[in-house]
Amino acid sequence: MPTTITIDPVTRIEGHLEIEVTVDSVGGEQKVVDAKSAGTMFRGFEIILAGRDPRDAAQYTQRICGVCPVSHAMASCLNLDDAFGVTSPDNGRILRNLVLGSNFIQSHILHFYHLSVLDYVDTTGLLDMSPWTPRYVTPDMTTGPTAAALVSNYVTALALRRKAHQMGAIFGGKLPCTGSFVVGGCTEVVTAEKIADFRTLLTEIRAFIDNTYVPDAATLAGLFPSYYGIGTGCGNLLAFGAFDLDATGANMLFNRGRYTDGASHSVDPAQITEYVQYGWYTPASGNKNPAQGVTEPDADKLGAYSWLKAPRYADKVHETGPLARMWVNGEYVNGISTLDRIVARANETKLIADTMDSWLDELTPGAATCAPSTIPQQAASMGLTEAPRGALGHWMNIDGSVITRYQVVTPTNWNASPKDDLDQMGPIEAALLDVPVVDVTKPVEVLRVVHSFDPCLACAVHLTRPDDRAGGTRVLIHPGIL
Amino acid sequence: MRISRRDFLKAAAAVTAAGGLTPAVLAKLARILRGEGNPRVIWLQGAGCDGCAVSFLNSVHYATADDLLVNTLDVEFHNNLSAAAGDLAVSAVQAAGAQPGYVLVIEGAIPTGAAGKYCRLWPGTSMHDGVVQFAQNAGFIIALGACAAYGGTPAGAPNPTEAKGVGEILGSDPRLINVPGCPSHPDWLVGTIAYLLANGYAPPLDAHRRPLAYFGRLIHDNCFKRRRYCGQGVFASQLSDQGCMEFLGCKGKHTRSDCYMRKWNSGGDGEYGVNWCIGARSPCLGCVEPTFPDGMSPFYVHLPAEKQSEDGKSADQGQEGVSAPPTLRRPDARPSLKADDLRGALDAHDHHH
């Protein structure tokens, strides 16, 4: 007898998400046989951006997400650099990388300890207070000294992620939402004192990553080895790449690439298509590249269940995130699963933090951090980078020196997407298939898989579920979740 | 686990020092915190970005986030932190809301278009209806961040979802305190909660219902660049230059907050922050003002005359009768939550089994 479980709200994510799974007996075991990931959010950022001064885009788009604002600032600034025909001086490029790296570190620490670990640990006797009660307790959860150590590190990690933000603010002005990212570079300047302050914090954070975070991820993996076989999903990985290592844009710490049908390939953004058969949009809104995107809502569309479009690369479903970045760069190729996402994220944190130290040596105190530029009369531009949780793209058109069109495709657009026109499930949906669920009243197995993607539906405006929409909700143009 | 509240008491003392905090009031707060359980907080997120929640986690100046979460406050629902999900989480927050007297923290704007359907907290409850419902039993209501306070970026033209701030939903409500900013500074929130608990009433507010202790003074009047550059007629001509940034769009002449002193991303107990927007040579965006963002943008252009507020036209006119910002530095060092506490809890746990 199939049972449908709806988890709404999914907590311990950024923003809001509804997951619906159908569980049935398969070979004597209760497993997920169907899954729907409903991105049901709308704020209208692209509409708000139209008509504004293009230089303001880096500030407006940061307000899309308070957890990964620096990634939006980076995508937006790369987009603006492209449109304005300006290249940041090396100092500005490196400062952008250092602030972005700081935010990756805080986000990854936050994800592991504060969003994820509670799916695996019985905190009875350790955190017997709200907001950690009520909670699910299942027999497979870790108890005893390991649980105590992880909870203790949960608390320690709050301080370390704060320090990562403190570190980023040295060059970012403040975090969340940096003021210093602008077209042409970074407003903050480089001094020997700032470099030293940054390095002091980085050294402390690296020790935590090396001695606590990476070992804790390994501990978790050792305790739940079955999750190397659970939550595999589509098996294809996509990375736009991030952290430019020089002014050419061709060399990055994480290079652009994808892993499709078991082989590595290059990425051509023109191959991205967004489908809408299962999104509340008209057919005319589908089958388009984001650079030419059209979005006409149809809130009463039969068969649709999400306000996310379904972006696909060359018609193939792709997952994006730390595992994709590490995989396409040959840094982690163990496998694709719930635990592989968690372990790759920890390893990536170490890689970024270690590399940041060397970037500090490349800074030149006193040298320019920002190149002057002027607003073009017309432009069509693109900025691709990475958020902690995956590939992020901004597309823009300028006419009459103002923004006429701004499009954003976020990582969670890919990962939490609904089915496409070829009836292929989105990455999270596909990863939920065959997940064993022991107790349908405590669906922690589902949460473990969903959380491994670190979904970010922040900036969420939640629309109604289909059964709430009797009034026929009408939404203005918008492609996804912003 | 419910160990000493001394840290929060000290924070309250620091916050209220300038407001005439007496030993009797402090003693009352001590009694409250000692005897009647922890102050309760329900935190709802609407059309926002979670940035104010992340900023709250950066708290350290008055008290660290872990100290506040573990030892001081009962945060009965928080979408980013709650262990429970789905129905279990919803039943918990409904039960909490039935017990009057909590501090309701609202983050994110409230869309009113499409009968509130643009934003839903959980099945059957829109953000709008949730705010109205949970406001009923709230002791105090804090609209945290630009979006909750005044609509913020989601309410930027053409305001596609007809997003509004809490005050526009609830009307004139003496329990409402706006703690704006994009994001809001953690000290502004923690200090305001400390004041509420210490005194039992709202701190002195300005016409926009902002605590004067944090939002009482113009940035420009107190900016180091005013003394060093503006007064000398030195203006930055392009971004990243030295000099006053008024003509690069800095909104410091039209913005009241203590960023110039408090700064952002403090590194420790009682410490000021490491940097701030103007310190990083980027123009103030005016993010604490009710007119943010439309009235404060374009961000990199000198504010047009028609957008200038009365504040800006009379930049030297301070708020009469407003006491100086509270003393920020606390004299004694404070131990953070220790692993010993957790080990002790584990021992008790083992003993119990």
Image (cartoon, rainbow, N blue to C red):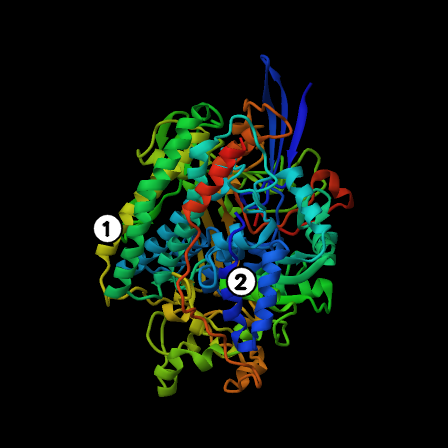
State the SS at label 2: helix
Disc 2 crowd, CA 10 A, few/some/many (<14, 14-19, 20+): many
Judge left or right: residue A308 versus residue B327. Answer: right
Number of numbered discs on residues: 2
Which residue lies at the image location 61% right of the left edge and 47% below the top edge? A41
Which residue lies at the image location 51% right of the left edge and 29% below the top edge? A141
Disc 1 crowd, CA 10 A, few/some/many (<14, 14-19, 20+): few
* Amino acid type, mark 1: Ser
Q: Position of residue A424 (x, y in %)?
A: 55, 28
Callout 1: residue from which chain?
Answer: A
Which residue lies at the image location 29% right of the left edge and 61% below the top edge? A197
Q: Report the front residue among A440 and A20.
A: A440
Whether discs 2 and 1 lie on one chain: the answer is no
Q: Position of residue A367 (x, y in %)?
A: 24, 66
Residue B280 visible at all: yes
Residue with the mark numbered 1:
A358
Residue with the mark numbered 2:
B190
Judge left or right: residue A396 versus residue B78. Answer: left
State the SS at label 1: helix
Q: Position of residue A22 (x, y in %)?
A: 64, 26
Residue A480 visible at all: no
Callout 2: residue from which chain?
Answer: B
Q: Report the front residue among B2 and B309.
A: B2
Q: Tell us which disc is closer to us: 2 or 1.
A: 2
